[in-house]
Image (cartoon, rainbow, N blue to C red):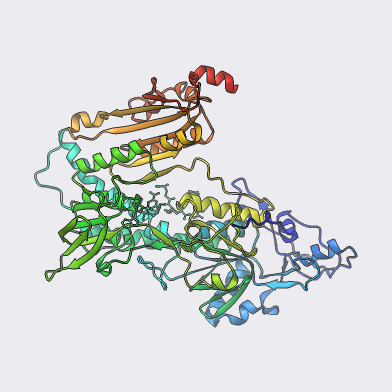
Amino acid sequence: MRQLPPPQINSTNRCLMGGPHPPAQGSQTSISYIYTKARDGDRKRTNMATTSFTAPKLSSPTLQTLYRNLPVSVPLPKTRSSFSRHLSPSISRFHHHHLHRHRLFSVRAESENGAEPPRHYDFDLFTIGAGSGGVRASRFAANFGASVAVCELPFSTISSETTGGVGGTCVLRGCVPKKLMVYASKYSHEFDESNGFGWKYDAEPKHDWSTLMANKNAELQRLTGIYKNILNNAGVILIEGRGKIVDPHTVDVDGKLYTARHILISVGGRPFIPEITGSEYAIDSDAALDLPSKPEKVAIVGGGYIALEFAGIFNGLTSEVHIFIRQKKVLRGFDEEIRDFVGEQMSLRGIEFHTEESPQAIVKSADGSLSLKTNKGTVEGFSHIMFATGRRPNTKNLGLESVGVKMNKNGAIEVDEYSRTTVPSIWAVGDVTDRINLTPVALMEGGALAKTLFQNEPTKPDYRAVPSAVFSQPPIGQVGLTEEQAIKEYGDIDVYTANFRPLKATLSGLPDRVFMKLVVCAETNKVLGLHMCGEDSAEIVQGFAVAVKAGLTKADFDATVGVHPTSAEEFVTMRTPTRKIRQKPDSEGKTGLEAKAAAGV
Ligand SMILES: NC(=O)C1=CN([C@@H]2O[C@H](COP(=O)(O)OP(=O)(O)OC[C@H]3O[C@@H](n4cnc5c(N)ncnc54)[C@H](OP(=O)(O)O)[C@@H]3O)[C@@H](O)[C@H]2O)C=CC1
Ligand SMILES: N[C@@H](CCC(=O)N[C@@H](CSSC[C@H](NC(=O)CC[C@H](N)C(=O)O)C(=O)NCC(=O)O)C(=O)NCC(=O)O)C(=O)O
């Protein structure tokens, strides 16, 4: 796609960020606050004495532009902008109160090239979508001194054209409720483990589905409230409704128009279900997180993150679970040995895998049960059929085509390295751009954008060594290259693996095992990739991700003392390579110490 030049930081930002400006001679505008940088990068507002000054007489064009771009605060009642004109009385009252509490209404004058007449905007940044990326960009931008509004649809556990909620996918329909359900479902395995440690129950522990759903939903309500407060405390104005871009600087929210110097699209994605006969009987992950009762027998179509996580959840909560994947293995793109290992371990916990089976139709029987017809036959008697067949960017009905924001064939917004779309004033972060669809990545993109636009610090998100976890049971954690990627990229690698029965399994008597792998560059001794499937792998990999990101060598790992007895210690005690792969001609590979010396470490 077209690469736009790095964003130019305009003089508004420079002035705003630069701390107290000397009052321009003769101005009558009151400046109420300055912003000082706090340790964590957020900014603290400092109350300043109001300064009165009248418009300065500036001779140089640069200074004139600088002055036009100064953020000037105008008391709301005196200045009715296009923004306040369109507000309904109740929203207007809220904004009036809110703006006065946080900062006076900011009207900015802009002249893009010095020749055009200055334009006034209601906001420096208008964000569409208050999920992880949108909230992060908006609140950081506000903390950097920008005037920011964000619009979001009303709360619902199920996303649609008319529902969403502050917090977005991660908080309301993804990571958080999913992890709560993972916690709920893990107990059954733990009850099984406990017998070997002497625990006896007079009766089988019972699970009450409605208690779990009620507590989970109460937590989601709490979190959406927390996210509203986070925005409010940062001085971001929240507007409930559906945003649609009208022109490169204007957003329509349910009939009211708001102008902004920059528009950010952070509307995320939604589950995708392929169109097959009977697909209306299928549920997606939104619905699966909010079922009124436990599924008795569930088919899960797909072999990605979501399919494996829900298979573990329903299996742990004692549903009968069948997974249908169109390939031989789950988790395309993951390390091959991890793909094999997780499949085996999940099978041992009672999940049935149907491989190389593609769904063709769903049929509902008179008794209400569902059958899944595939290329290999029909499996009957499901209470639920869940599709976890990927997610699609949420870019319909946003007005993107009409303003010229380019999208790829899946509807993902194309952006440059700074998250800028093909329209220079419009930016996009998070799943809507389909880069790496993970919450911490959206947070990174949102934070980088706020710095780029409002802190005079053009910042590209860094996609090297992004760790991730699949909260399957057992879970997977990984960072860096798979063995297959490393061979392709480096040719010569050493692979260290450990496949062992963890201490806990010796008394529990369960067939649980752990698999761990280090992929090491033979030439430099750097650890290129680290993979684990087994209890606690997500927690373990987060720490090791620092080492991989920092480019540490296998020798550095060897020099680290283990924590005993843990599974994690295997990563620092793998002494002999399981295999050495040599693809470069005449290549022997170096030992750890030789490589360390060669690299000057
Ligand atoms: N723990 C985490 O960090 C989590 C992250 N996520 C994020 O959300 C994204 C979406 O997750 P998910 O929905 O699991 O998507 P994924 O892309 O991970 O997996 C989709 C799965 O569905 C299969 N599939 C796609 N289309 C069809 C079809 N028409 N018929 C049969 N099978 C099909 C794919 O098979 P094939 O491989 O053959 O294409 C693949 O196995 C992930 O990529 C991840 O970024 C989601 C949940 C948890
Ligand atoms: N990691 C811990 C904490 C989980 C957590 O971070 N909970 C979040 C909610 S979900 S997570 C939602 C996600 N937050 C985060 O990912 C926070 C990550 C990290 N603390 C950071 O600052 O980068 C997000 O969308 N952030 C937008 C933003 O920060 O701008 C929270 O806000 N809790 C407050 C509370 O419970 O009182 C755990 O797993 O137990």
Up-down relation of residue 243 to residue 355 (above or below): below
Q: Where is residue 586 drawn, in percent x and y?
A: 50, 21
Q: How many marks?
A: 0
Residue extending farthest to the left is 202
| Residue 41 left/right relative to 437 | right
Camera-nearest residue between 516 and 129:
516
Task: Check the image and report above or below for 408 versus 500.
Answer: below
Is any atom of residue 482 visible in this view? no
Residue 118 figure quarter: bottom right
Q: Residue at x 32, y 41 (%)?
A: 339
Residue 173's place in the image compared with 191, above or below, is below
Look at the image and tell me whether residue 264 can be seen. yes
Left or right of 289 in this view: 189:
left
> Is 387 in front, or is 263?
387
Residue 446: horizontal and vertical position, in percent? Answer: 55, 55
Residue 16 location, quadrant: bottom right
Identify the residue shown where x is 41% and y is 70%: 163
Q: Quadrant of the N terminus?
A: bottom right
Left/right placement of residue 262 relative to residue 271 reads: right
Q: Quadrant of the C terminus?
A: top right
